[in-house]
Image: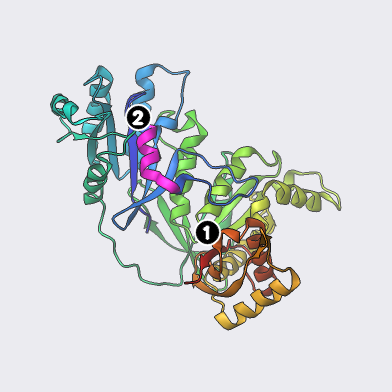
């Protein structure tokens, strides 16, 4: 089940990005100091009163080659298409403008809930000036101050009223996976080729409210899969083609709903910066990952081609050293038969649980090989460790001073755990906690 999405829209300079940062809080900061993980500020996860949600900051989208009103219209269209709830941000200092009325008319015709936030209301005396915003026809305006963090709780309280109730999901054996990647890497061709590779199509399952159609099929081994469709990028007009950031939003929606993510690369074009960006989304989300190099048939190869390509991938995707790599061709169906089995293995590794006694044996052996670091004469002490979660496997290591657990040593412990257990294809998390 995908988490709900808020979209923040409005004309320039009303404080959309400030509100976005306030709502995102610490979740937008760098979680892992790993080279190669590129984060994009247009999309973030947050939480309010126990409800998780995603935030889209349309203010981060720049289309300077288009007229001013067209930019605002595109933002509104993206919000209508992608979001469950829309927050229209205006400015209490300037009052209602023509641009505010323009985007309000677009949003008013949509079927999505719209919350009207009047930003830059930094003192109580300004609250009397917000009543003119009733003229936008979007209900009660809510005064906020992004710079001071005032009124955001009222906006989020109103937003979560429109979220669908959380339904308990039944555990099933179905594996959900998606294919993400740059345009023209061959995602659609791979989907079609996989479905034609001796699979039995079970049904077309309605996906999200964004008219995506997910496809259910059964592999030769009897494992049922749901392939999450990301082809919804094809939209009338050229709204989505204007910037890669829109496709990043689509990729994030697919990642949220997936157990395993296939990061598709184009063998002809090699690795691009955008490949690393969207792969970083899947890594940060803790999803199982398989790197799929498509169009492998188009290369002139020798005995070293595959090894050299793998070295490039490992160099550029250093944070994905756990992800298996498969070289395929949608055209010739080369190695396509391997994908369902690899996806199934990665999904199983995502749910692997390690008994605490065995885990602690591995940790203590690791400490014996490489003693814990010291700082100002004080040594990090590891008392014990336990696994606290799956999807991704997450381990809490209880220590004397959690600040002394340097990233490099946590990385060492992760490598030792990977050597001892089968965690191919899944990120693992190590969290240091001070023993009380």
Residue 426 sits in which quadrant?
bottom right
Q: Is residue 414 magenta?
A: no
Identify the residue at image location x=13%, y=27%.
128
Mark 2, mark 1: which one is toward the viewer? 2
Q: Residues within 10 Å of mark 2 (few under 14, many from 20)?
A: many
Q: Is residue 355 left or right of residue 208?
A: right
Q: Is residue 415 above or below residue 191?
A: below
Q: Residues within 10 Å of mark 1 (few under 14, many from 20)?
A: many
Determine whether label 2 and label 1 are within 8 Å by CB.
Answer: no
**In the foreground, 58 or 195:** 58
Q: Is residue 196 visible?
A: no
Q: Is residue 301 left or right of residue 317?
A: right
Residue 53 percent across, percent down from the top left? 35, 50
Residue 372 sits in which quadrant?
bottom right
Mark pair 2, 1: CA separation:
33 Å
Q: Which residues are magenta?
A: 17-26
Identify the residue at image location x=44%, y=49%.
27
Q: Which residue is mark 2?
A: 15
**In the foreground, 354 or 267:** 354
Q: Residue furthest right?
A: 303
Magenta portion: prevailing SS class: helix
Image color mode: rainbow
Q: Is residue 103 left or right of residue 222?
A: left
Q: Residue furthest bottom?
A: 357
Q: Is residue 346 left or right of residue 200?
A: right
Q: Which mark is residue 287?
A: 1
Residue 229 percent across, percent down from the top left? 46, 51
Residue 293 percent across, percent down from the top left? 67, 50
For marks 2 and 1, the one nearer the N-term is 2
Q: Is residue 22 visible?
A: yes
Q: Is residue 236 above or below residue 318?
A: above
């Amino acid at each position: 089940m995908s988490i709900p999405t808020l979209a923040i829209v409005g004309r320039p300079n009303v404080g959309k990005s400030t509100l976005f940062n306030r709502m995102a809080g610490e979740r937008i900061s760098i979680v892992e100091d790993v080279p190669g993980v590129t984060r994009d500020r247009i999309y973030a996860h947050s939480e309010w009163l126990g409800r998780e949600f995603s935030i889209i900051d349309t203010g981060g989208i720049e289309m300077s080659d288009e007229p001013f009103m067209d930019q605002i219209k595109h933002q509104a269209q993206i919000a209508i298409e992608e979001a469950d709830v829309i927050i229209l941000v205006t400015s209490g200092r300037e009052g209602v403008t023509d641009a505010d009325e323009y985007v309000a008319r677009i949003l008013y015709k949509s079927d999505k809930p719209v919350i009207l936030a009047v930003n830059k209301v930094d003192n109580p005396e300004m609250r009397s000036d917000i009543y003119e915003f009733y003229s936008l026809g979007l209900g009660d305006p809510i005064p906020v101050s992004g710079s001071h963090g005032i009124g955001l709780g009222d906006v989020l309280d109103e937003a979560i009223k429109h979220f669908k109730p959380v339904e308990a999901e039944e555990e099933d054996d179905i594996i959900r996976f998606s294919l993400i990647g740059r345009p023209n890497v061959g995602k659609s061709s791979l989907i079609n080729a996989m479905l034609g590779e001796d699979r039995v199509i079970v049904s077309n399952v309605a996906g999200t409210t964004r008219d995506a159609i997910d496809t259910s099929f059964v592999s030769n081994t009897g494992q049922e899969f749901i392939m999450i469709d990301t082809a919804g990028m094809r939209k009338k007009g050229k709204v989505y083609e204007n910037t890669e950031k829109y496709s990043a939003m689509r990729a994030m929606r697919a990642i949220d709903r997936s157990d395993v993510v296939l990061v598709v690369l184009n063998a002809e074009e090699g690795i691009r910066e955008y490949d690393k960006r969207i792969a970083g989304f899947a890594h940060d989300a803790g999803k199982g990952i398989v790197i799929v190099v498509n169009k492998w048939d188009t290369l002139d190869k020798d005995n070293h081609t595959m090894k050299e390509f793998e070295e490039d991938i490992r160099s550029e995707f250093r944070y994905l050293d756990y992800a298996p790599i498969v070289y395929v061709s949608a055209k010739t169906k080369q190695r396509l038969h391997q994908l369902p089995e690899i996806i199934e293995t990665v999904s199983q590794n995502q749910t692997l649980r390690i008994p605490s006694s065995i885990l602690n044996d591995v940790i203590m052996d690791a400490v014996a090989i490489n003693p814990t670091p010291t700082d100002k004469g004080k040594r990090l002490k590891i008392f014990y460790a336990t696994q606290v979660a799956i999807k991704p496997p997450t381990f809490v290591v209880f220590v004397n001073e959690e600040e002394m657990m340097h990233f490099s040593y946590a990385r060492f412990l992760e490598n030792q755990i990977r050597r001892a257990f089968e965690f191919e294809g899944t990120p693992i998390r190590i969290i240091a906690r001070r023993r009380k």
